[in-house]
Amino acid sequence: MGRTSLAFQEMRTQTTDVGFYGEMAFCQNSRHYSCVSGGFTLAKDSSNRRRVLAGAAALFAAGSSRAQMVALPFGNGERPLKTYPEKRPMLVLTERPPQLETPFEVFDHGAFTSNDAFFVRYHLAGTPPRGLDAATHRVKVLGAVNTPLDLSLEDLRRDFPVVELAAVNECSGNGRGFSSPRVAGGQLGEGMMGNALWRGVSVRALLQRAGVMASAHAVEFNGADRPQIATVADFVKGLGIDHARNGEVMLAYEMNGAPLPLLNGYPLRLIVPGYYGTYWVKHLTDLTVLEQESQSYWMQKAYRIPDNDCACVPAASAAGATRPIGKLNVRSFITNFTDGQTAQASPKVLVRGIAFDGGAGIEAVELSSDGGRTWKPTALGKDHGQFSFREWSAHLPLDPGEHLLVARARNKAGDLQPQAANWNPSAYMRNASDVVRVVAA
Amino acid sequence: MNPFAQTLLAFLALATAGSAAARETGSKTPQPYSAPSETSRFIEAPGINLAQRYCLTCHSADYVSTQPPHMPAAFWQNEVTKMRNAYGAPIPDEAAKAITDYLMATYSEPSAGRR
């Protein structure tokens, strides 16, 4: 057994009960994770926001020399909670390059995800890149354009209209750890998503300034991160020319009213509303207009899905023909209960959560308390735009006993979350209806 | 209020003050990036030296230890092949075979692979 295994065993023995304001808070199993060392506490009364304080307990503990651990509910799901620059304690999937998952209770705190809790995903060694500075950063527009551009962030702020947009960034493999059968790749829980208000300039405005040639077919986006070995492919993504200039795709220099954290793409990041996070290139330096589609490894070989309507194949079979991953599929989560949680039996129990999709907009979220046999409508919260998280809530009667709460969203294109997860070899685009077991007493 | 809660509240107050200051500045001065030190390690077993030498060039050991437990030997064969052919890891044939054997023996065992 290795050193880290021993350390983990040791930590498991240190479970502590933590009390806040004289009320009992407790650690328990969860769909999202279970507490293994006293870090995560859930208040008994689920209708309040005391989980903010529970998060603080983890923050406190992470300040000590011993890392807190949480366990995602699948094999090898133990994750240390560590504090990275500009971040609160996050679940560490991998240390180098850093891949950090948002603690799930954050999604119960409103439609927007705090910058210091926003998930982090990198591909290449040597990331994040060092020495980036908004004051000296340049972004270039090159390739099949009449006038190549080389701009500072000051140029972007001064010479182009400001655009502001709420949009969800979700990792293509969010929830991969739950895939059955399991597959190789980053073993993610369900915290690799977040919603932010992005502020910057539209890619359309930049391309108009540069003057796109009639022969243009696609735009490639590159950031400051570079592979450390010459044989490893640089992280470059491509969008079709019409997609790139649809007015929605943008370059963001602010996120939720502040400069982006380094780990989320400081000082400039590509925002592709409605599309999976793989397209949202960080530390953006180059837009190159191409006369053919992008030949990047990250378009041609990686992040590809089965080329059919469900992006799925029978479990454990090969993908067959593939296409690049695209729009987010419709998804919802219950955020104020975690699996196995106890609730007070009542004729009126508040259940709430979030829903999102690839930009058609959320039409409705339905809630079941009997495992999906019967459904009730929920009330949708404020509409922050069709690319944002949409809050929802409902009151349910919960008699004493166990209840299987299930949430499913439907978007304005008529797409409905499936009851069971579709399967594909990379476990992309998971969007099974969210199931949470609650025990009312 | 117990001592733990007092300490926690003091810490919270500090954390809140810090984030408020950051928000007021609007733009920020880049700070030197200092991530927590890397702590994940490969499991001690024959072959660990090659795994450390080649795999750790590009990623930390938790890329391996967080993969699903009890996977068939072919899983690790595929992973090493993917690293070499798809991701361009310059691992010589002989080392690749030894690393594959190490991963299969160490991380597919029912009781292994935990960290």
Image (spheres, coloured by chain):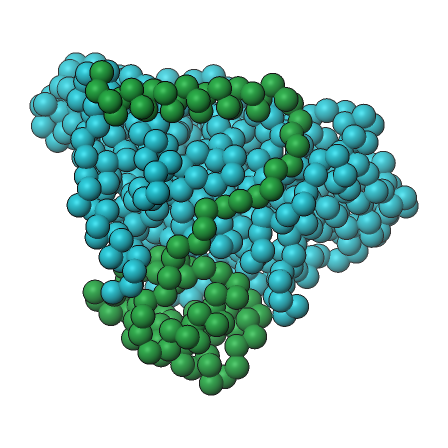
Residue shown at 53%/44% (left/top)? B34
Q: Position of residue B86 (x, y in %)?
A: 55, 69
Q: Quadrant of the C terminus of chain A?
A: top left
Residue shown at 39%/55% (left/top)? B39
Residue B106 relative to residue A147: left or right? left
Chain rendered green: B
Check the image and report above or below for B101 versus A225.
below
Outermost bottom residue? B94
Q: Position of residue A25 (x, y in %)?
A: 20, 25
Q: Quadrant of the N terminus of chain A?
A: bottom left
Check the image and report above or below for B74 versus A280.
below
Which sits in the foreground, A219 or A9? A9
Q: Position of residue A135 (x, y in %)?
A: 75, 34
**Quadrant of res B75:** bottom left
Residue A190 relative to residue A112: left or right? left
Residue shown at 30%/60% (left/top)? A3
Which sits in the foreground, B81 or A61? A61
**Quadrant of res B79:** bottom left
Indicate the colour of chain A: cyan
Residue A382 relative to residue A70: left or right? right
Outermost right residue? A146
Look at the image and tell me whether residue A377 can be seen.
no
**Quadrant of res A107:** top left
- Numbered disc total: 0
Look at the image and tell me whether residue A78 can be seen.
yes
Q: Position of residue A331 (x, y in %)?
A: 41, 36
Check the image and report above or below for A144 versus A65.
below
